[in-house]
Image: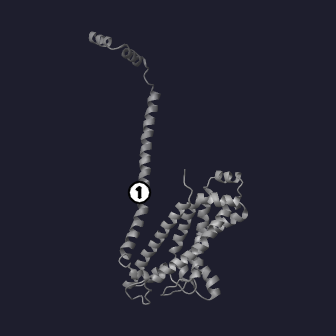
Amino acid sequence: MTAQREDRSSRGPQSQASDTATMSRPAPSPETLASGLRRVSLSRRRRLVDRLATGGMVLSLLLAVVPLGLVCYYVILKGGKVISLAFLTDDIPRQVRRVGPGMGPAIVGTIVITGMAALLAIPLGVLAAIYLNEYGKQKPLAQVIRTMADVMTGVPSIVMGLFVYVTWVVATGTTSGFAGSLALACLMLPVVIRSSEEILRLVPDELRQASLALGARRWRTTVTVVLPAAISGIVSGALLAIARAAGETAPLIATIGITFSTNWKLTGDNTALPAQIFRNASQPFAGAQERAWGAALTLVTIVLVFTFIARLIANRFAIKER
């Protein structure tokens, strides 16, 4: 006891006051202790849920990436053995039993037919999206266009091919690359309309109001303010439509005919990589299957190259954040 008194007397007045405050502080009530335990338990539960959610997202990413990686691996593995300058430039063998190149006419046909389809569908789709979002709003005509675009998005590609076959090929009496472009444009159009409209909705109304307040007309506001702000998303939607159209086979089989030599024109019979992939992959001969793998790798490469080019164009004309 004497030692404790000496120790307390040797400490300063601030320490003695702190000890007195600690001794005089009331003990926490059972309700306070229970509340603290609940907070600790809730914090632990939140951490556990956060970790489970993160693990689920990582697992979902792996489930999506692994099949894509396997497809790319097999396409590169099988097609890389066939790719050569002769494969990319020579004419298509007339005999499927033959081993060797090439796919030059199919590459040219894919570029010409898909390019024409993009020229037909993308401007028309963007203009339709501008009308729906900037002018039509909830008008009856705009509602009808949205409904028809949604319906066309779910229509099978073979139906589009048969529609163009009946309305164009039968009417003109001949297959052609232009007929294939029409079929692919019908597939691309609803995708461009819906994706572009959703992107235009994301443009803040404050930008439109500021432009209108400065005296600009609505069409000028759309061209100089709204479209530059949404150009990246519009390009992404157009790329999605092109990627879908470039790999379609059914509409082309019924509309473009078949040729074994290069045809840069949209008139007359033509061919494309998807049609050649289908034709060669369905054959039991080794040479035909090798050409199918090479055509598949070439098609993937073409889509990838045009994607990079479109991204560069979108970044060049997009409004930079300040």
Where residue 192 sits, quadrant-wise, is bottom right
User: Quick check: 230 above or below 293?
Assistant: above
Image point (44%, 32%), residue name: 36
Residue at 69% x, 64% y: name it: 142
For label 1, the residue is 59
Q: Nearer the viewer, residue 152 or 208?
A: 208
Q: Residue 204 appears at what percent x and percent y? A: 62, 52
- Asked if residue 290 is positioned above or below residue 14 in the image, the reply reads below
Q: Residue furthest bottom?
A: 95
The one of 5 and 120 positioned closer to us in this rendering: 120
State the image quarter where residue 77 is shown.
bottom left
Q: Quadrant of residue 189?
A: bottom right
- Indicate whether 38 appears above or below 166: above
Task: Report the residue at 41% width, 57% height from top.
Answer: 59
**Colour basis:** one colour
The vertical placement of 5 against 321, above or below, is above
Total count of labels: 1
Answer left or right for 133 relative to 249.
right
Q: Residue furthest left?
A: 3
The residue at the point 50 percent across, 87 percent down is 259
x and y percent of residue 117 in the render? 58, 75
x, y percent for residue 83: 38, 78
Three-letter amino acid code at disc 1? Leu
Is the residue marked by circle 1 packed among few (<14), some (14-19), or many (20+) residues within 10 Å? few
Q: Quadrant of the N terminus?
A: top left
Q: Is residue 195 visible?
A: yes
Q: Looking at this rendering, what residue extends furthest in the top direction?
A: 2
For the residue labelled by badge 1, is the local secondary structure a helix, a strand or a loop? helix
